[in-house]
Amino acid sequence: MENDTQKNNEEMFKASDVSVLLERIDHNVQIIAEGHKMLDEKIDRMEKNLIEKLDIIEGGLDTKASMKTVDEHEERIVKLEKAAAIA
């Protein structure tokens, strides 16, 4: 009885069957690896774009802050000029 089971197991897994199975597994692993590589590249592109956009926003905020400072100085100058004219 054990000999029959052993023969059935041997017949189930012939070398060519195992070879085909390994080729399929290898192919699937390659597909997964390619997918991960593409995702990694996409993440890198998105990170680069995000950094560029943040730099633009940061530059705009710096410009607004600079303009506010200029406006504040102009107001002070006007007040000083008025005070000097009164004195």
Image (spheres, rainbow, N blue to C red):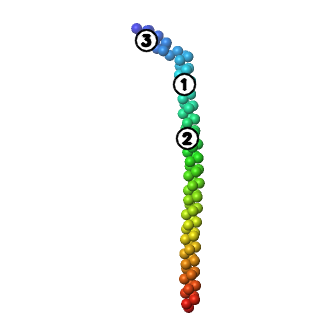
- For marks 2 and 1 on the same chain, the one whose residue lies earlier in the sequence: 1
Query: What is the x, y in percent for residue 1?
Result: 40, 8
Mark 1 or mark 3: which is in front? 1
What amino acid type is highlighted by mark number 2? Leu
| SS assignment at label 1 | helix
Q: Is residue 1 above or below residue 79?
A: above
Alpha-carbon distance for marks 2 and 1?
23 Å
Alpha-carbon distance for marks 1 and 3?
27 Å
Bin the neighbour count of mark 1 within 10 Å (Cα to Cα): few under 14, some 14-19, many 20 and up.
few
Give the residue at the far left of this rendering: 1
Q: Which dot marks residue 5?
A: 3
Question: Who is closer to the viewer here, 47 or 17?
Answer: 47
What amino acid type is highlighted by mark number 3? Thr
- For marks 1 and 3 on the same chain, the one whose residue lies earlier in the sequence: 3
Whether residues under marks 2 and 1 lie with C-beta atoms below 8 angstroms apart, the answer is no
Q: Which dot marks residue 39?
A: 2
Q: Which dot marks residue 24?
A: 1
Query: What is the x, y in percent for residue 87?
Result: 56, 91
Q: Which dot marks residue 69?
A: none
**Residue at point 42%, 10% (across, down):** 2
Whether residues under marks 1 and 3 lie with C-beta atoms below 8 angstroms apart, the answer is no
Question: Who is closer to the viewer here, 60 or 9?
Answer: 60
